Image (cartoon, rainbow, N blue to C red):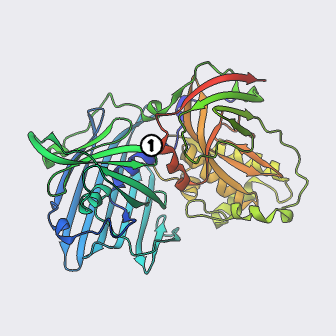
Amino acid sequence: MPKIQYSFIWGVFVTIIFITLLIIRLEIVPENREQTTIVPVAADRRPADTWMNIYQNDKKIGFVHRTFTRMDKGFHFAEEAFMQINALGVIQALTILTEGDLNYDMTISSFNFNLTSGIFRFNAHGSIVKNKLIIFTGLPGSQEKSEIPVGEIPHMSGGVYDAAFAAKLEKDTTGNFSIFDPSTLAMRQVKVTRNADEIIPVMGKRTLTQKYCADFMGARNCAWLNKNGETLKETGMLGLSLEKVSPEEARKETAKDGIIDFTQAASIPANVAIQEPVKLTGIKLKITGIGHMFFYVNGGRQHLRKDVLTITRETPSPSQRSADKLPPELAVFLKATPLIQAGDPAMKEQVDNIVKPGDPPEQKISKIVNWVYRHIEKKPSLSVPNALEVLKNKTGDCNEHAVLVAALLRTAGIPAQIETGLVYLRGRFYYHAWNIAYADSWLTADAVFNQVPADVTHIRLIRGESDKQLDLIGVMGKIKIDVLEQTK
């Protein structure tokens, strides 16, 4: 294995956790109109201006500022979230801006989502057109259009907890909602349960609140709302919480030190050390805590029997096919997607500089992986990975490496996908993303480590792009791994 610094491993979870925690209540689409009809009067009672501090285990790491304004034809909402996040020992600033217009009956008219972290920027904006949510992603000049069927025109109440409040859930009852996540362009189901009322201290006063808890992909978040439906407090995973404060308190500086490293907090300790993983031909693990989630744990080089997972290193062999004999069912993995811009002129130019038309598939895979390994600076990135942005900025974590490799491989005529799961490094398993490419058979490839095939400590949990990676949220902090056997 090449000498990779610890800080080079960076999983998908940080961006997803923060974006989900903060916008889960902004992109709300009620699933059942009878259960979740929004009453405009409830919206009128909401404060026009709310400030909340963001805490990580009682240390302030940021703030949220929300506004909700009555307009002639409906409402306008806006939310600004600012955070200082410790990712692999590096404190980074993350700013998320979300706003939109709502019709008087609270149906969505339009939204605009911006995420900024260092040199990385991500934008998604869209509107409802008939029964479709039309979305544009990317920065001006390189935008991609996509459409999501929504059935009936969706509602946006300002949040999943606001929707539950407006639905007038009775105590000990549960409502089902759908949310749209603009960072992954995914629709997801959320169950919200109203618990017993609680009295909590807020801004020096004890206030009677309605408590709601949301089950999002197996992860539990809770919120406390006052009698007018204003959110006063929220708690999330990995020690995250939000609490209402005064504007003056929210504007105070965030913590300077002692902020927990989220990557380390979400990692999983190994029971034994794994020496030189790159030399292993197989490994046997006991893995628990994945529950009944629909992960892609079994299949290909991975075999799961009960709780025992066996991973066998692939043996690449020279391809016997030409490019025009690709099985038709694999053609979908050559297509461009909003964040993997295969076939873009910039991608074509770069591919022409890396591979030759006559190179066999396995050689194209190795050349592209090696080029990304050598030319993309390995730095933690709190952003939504975008292949064109990575090619331009030439920096990023495993997510940026994976989307760029996928885009380059597809442009070169090699079917490619993204896999997400765990990888071993220095006594722990960390959340990580890599690729799988087709050369007569599927072959793992990791541009962060410059490995083709990837070593057997790469444990696949998910196969797919960012919309699939949301599934990981439900198992973070629950998975346990024991190494049973190592085979050389």
Whether 164 is drawn above or below 453: the answer is below
Could one spot residue 251 in this view of the protein?
Answer: no
257 or 206, nearer to the observer: 206
From the viewer's side, name the closer residue of 438 and 172: 172
In the image, residue 80 sits, relative to residue 311, either above or below, namely below
Total marks drawn? 1
Establish if 94 lies above or below 32.
above
Amino acid type at circle 1 is Val
In terms of depth relative to the viewer, which is nearer, 232 or 325? 232
Q: Which of 41 and 370 is in front in this view?
A: 41
Q: Is 469 above or below relative to 259?
A: below
Residue 73 x/y as whole percent:
23, 80
- Residue 312 appears at what percent x and percent y? 76, 34
Query: Residue at (32%, 65%) from the top-left corner?
Result: 35
Q: Where is residue 488 in the image (x, y as percent from the top left)?
A: 79, 23
Residue extending furthest toward the right: 320
The secondary structure type at the circle numbered 1 is: helix
Dividing the picture into quarters, in which one does residue 3 lie?
Answer: top right
In the rendered view of the protein, which quadrant contains the N terminus?
Answer: top right
Q: Residue at x 31, y 53 (%)?
A: 173
Is residue 255 visible in the rendered structure shown here?
yes
Q: Name the residue under label 1.
A: 14
Decide if residue 147 is on the left or right side of residue 53: right
